[in-house]
Image: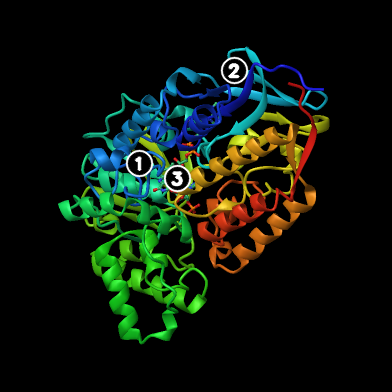
């Protein structure tokens, strides 16, 4: 039997995913929905990551929702990439425009969610001690929201400030300070480019060198803005059918099918134009899959480092030797920054951090790096990290951490066996792409699945083991076609000490992923079991 619950659906998180889930389920499906967000405001990533230089490195015209045309009509984004404050303001405006705020409870973390099998509902406990019940639970926890904070001996002795980029304090101004930054991923490199111009001195602690390409950020021309407005529907159609969903046509030309001169010309043109995804996927079709093609691209970037960085020793330390197979990143003048007199590079592979002292960081060579602020740009426990900090228990009291002990899995990135009516946005094995179009895809599919369950009068919908295993295998095969597993990164959980390396994304592209979702829905959801009967 079913019981009357406080809500039809509870959404956890109010970033891109949670905001759209609330809109879709409440405004379009007419459900009674409440969203809970731990932060003091909406925006998710763009609420938390306020470090100097924070911005999306996917171009603004596709790093946004497609369902809400407002931005294009009002024409407020005027640069190629959008800085954090503008993305945050946009998300706040979406919330206001669709009257969502009244159903978002801020400053409220969800601590646990326990499934009641006989009543087919979730019992949700909040960090203020209150509880509520809901039929559907939509987790929009963020694939990059659980911070990775390394510990160092002597950390408590440090008299300066230690901050993670993903929890940047509003009162922190690094102007004129001695700043150290650990981490040179997408975040660390963005921070370095901006912080070098603010800090008195910037010490960059690098564990792994990065392949960076220029972002090519600049104001948009009138013609470009007009083209985005006029081509709106066509642009989104192309994005949804493409692989990485970044708003450009991906190449299908093999890099080795052209002459070395032509390859160089294509790379040079992409370097001039800017953008990491364009460089990896728009130049040739096999940079991410063929070792020779990959090496050609890597070698081109290595050559650029040598050209740009004046001190040969610094250039050597900045030069990666592994394949170019992390999430592609871009920024404004990363390598150039190391020509500045106030920037020092420390290679942690050569001189690891030994300890922290009252004054700063001491490396294994005995050097004490004096700092006022230490910035941890050390990334996130990605994808399943935010699930593991919660107590989520499904049928028979099954703990999601136990369920995922061999690595996180799902059916199509949105559901997992043993957890009926729990629908994840950007759960494990979602499509590897620009994320807002992936989020819209999944939320729409979840809404349609809920509609299908309601129409059948079913009390619950749950992924089957077989379907989940098949999807897991499909994702492993798709990853195996790429070079990404050859390199340690957050994409496979390799950045977290003790975390089991596993495939956490579908690498077949957003277009193929959407086609699969469509096929499953059209076939009446094979792979989903509908349980029980809903009493009205
Ligand atoms: P989030 O925005 O992370 O929102 C999740 C929310 O859930 C958070 O606010 C969190 O506080 C809340 N939450 C989690 N657990 C709980 C709980 N138990 N109780 C209550 N609330 C909870 N992606 C791209 O595609 N392109 C980019 O250029 C890009 N740039 C990025 C730059 C940075 C610095 C970072 C960190 C990420 C970037 N990303 C980028 C990824 C980005 O996270 C996604 O694009 C998108 O913002 C994810 O939205 P989301 O709603 O799924 O998650
Ligand atoms: P990333 O890409 O995971 O980068 C984190 C960086 O921090 C990377 O250089 C890591 O080195 C370094 N790191 C992590 N842990 C340590 C420790 N313990 N010691 C020293 N250095 C460390 O996170 P970002 O925030 O930059 O980007 C995440 C995604 O957000 C990004 O792809 C975009 O989608 C936005 P490593 O390379 O692991 O050796």
Q: Position of residue 227 (x, y in %)?
A: 24, 55
* Residue at 48% across, 40% down: 355
Q: Is residue 468 above or below residue 158?
A: below
Viewer-closest of 376 and 438: 438
* Mark 1 neighbour class, 10 Å CA radius: few under 14, some 14 to 19, many 20 or more: many
Mark seen at residue 180? 1
Residue, disc 2: 127
119 on left or right of 431: right
Task: Return the mark for residue 433.
Answer: none
Q: For this rendering, which residue is in front, 51 or 373?
A: 51
N-terminal of the pair, mark 2 or mark 3, is: 2
2 or 1: mark nearer the eye: 2
The residues bearing labels 2 and 1 have C-alpha atoms spaced at a distance of 34 Å
Colouring: rainbow
> For numbered disc 2, what is the local secondary structure?
loop
Residue 382 in view here: no
Residue identified by numbered label 3: 436
Question: In the drawing, does residue 269 fall left or right of residue 17?
Answer: left
Q: Position of residue 233 (x, y in %)?
A: 36, 52
Q: CA distance from mark 3 to mark 1?
A: 32 Å
Q: Residue 164's spot in the image, x, y percent?
A: 43, 35
The CB of the residue at mark 3 lies under 8 Å from ligand 1:
yes
Front residue of this view, candidates 280 and 99: 99
Q: Is residue 78 visible?
A: yes
Point out the tag, 2 or 1, that comes first from the N-terminus. Answer: 2
Mark 3: secondary structure = helix
**C-alpha gap between disc 2 and disc 3:** 28 Å
Q: Residue at x 27, y 33 (%)?
A: 174
């Amino acid at each position: 039997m079913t019981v009357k619950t406080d809500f039809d659906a509870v959404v956890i998180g109010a970033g891109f995913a949670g905001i759209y889930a609330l809109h879709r389920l409440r405004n379009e499906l007419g459900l009674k929905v409440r969203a809970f967000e731990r932060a003091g405001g909406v925006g998710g990533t763009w609420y938390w990551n306020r470090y100097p230089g924070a911005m999306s490195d996917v171009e603004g015209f596709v790093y946004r929702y497609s369902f809400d045309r407002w931005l294009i009509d009002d024409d407020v984004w005027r640069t190629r990439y959008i800085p954090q404050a503008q993305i945050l303001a946009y998300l706040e405006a979406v919330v206001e425009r669709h009257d969502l705020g009244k159903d978002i409870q801020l400053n409220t973390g969800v601590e646990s969610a326990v499934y009641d099998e006989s009543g087919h509902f979730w019992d949700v406990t909040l960090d203020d001690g209150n509880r509520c019940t809901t039929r559907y639970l939509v987790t929009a926890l963020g694939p990059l929201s659980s911070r990775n904070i390394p510990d160092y001996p002597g950390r408590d002795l440090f008299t300066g400030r230690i901050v993670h980029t993903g929890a940047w304090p509003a009162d922190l101004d690094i102007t004129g300070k001695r700043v150290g930054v650990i981490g040179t991923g997408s975040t660390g490199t963005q921070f370095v480019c901006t912080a070098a111009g603010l800090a008195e001195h910037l010490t960059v602690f690098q564990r792994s060198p990065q392949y960076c390409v220029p972002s090519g950020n600049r104001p948009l021309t009138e013609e470009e803005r007009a083209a985005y407005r006029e081509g709106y529907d066509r642009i989104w159609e192309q994005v949804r059918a493409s692989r990485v969903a970044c708003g450009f046509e991906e190449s299908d030309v093999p890099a080795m099918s052209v002459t070395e001169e032509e390859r160089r010309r294509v790379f040079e043109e992409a370097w001039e134009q800017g953008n990491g995804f364009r460089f990896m996927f728009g130049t040739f079709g096999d940079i991410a899959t063929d070792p020779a093609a990959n090496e050609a691209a890597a070698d081109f970037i290595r050559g650029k480092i040598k050209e740009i960085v004046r001190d040969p020793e610094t250039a050597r330390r900045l030069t990666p030797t592994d394949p170019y197979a992390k999430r592609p990143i871009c920024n404004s003048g990363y390598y150039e920054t190391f020509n500045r007199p106030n920037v020092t590079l420390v290679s942690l592979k050569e001189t690891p951090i030994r300890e922290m002292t009252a004054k700063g960081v001491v490396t294994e060579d005995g050097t004490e790096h004096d700092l006022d602020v230490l910035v941890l740009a050390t990334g996130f426990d990605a994808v399943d990290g935010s699930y593991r900090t919660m107590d989520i228990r499904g049928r028979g009291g099954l703990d999601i951490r136990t369920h995922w002990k061999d690595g996180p899995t799902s059916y199509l990135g949105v559901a997992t066996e043993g957890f009926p009516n729990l629908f994840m946005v950007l759960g494990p094995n979602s499509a590897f792409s620009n994320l807002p179009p992936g989020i819209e895809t999944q939320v729409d599919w979840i809404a349609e699945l809920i509609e299908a369950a309601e129409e059948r009068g079913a009390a619950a919908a749950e992924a089957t083991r077989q379907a989940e295993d098949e999807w897991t295998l499909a994702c492993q095969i798709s990853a195996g076609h790429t070079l990404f597993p050859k390199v340690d990164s957050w994409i496979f959980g390799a950045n977290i000490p003790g975390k089991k390396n596993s495939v956490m994304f579908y690498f077949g592209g957003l277009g193929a992923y959407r086609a699969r979702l469509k096929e499953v829905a059209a076939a009446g959801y094979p792979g989903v079991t509908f349980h029980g009967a809903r009493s009205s």
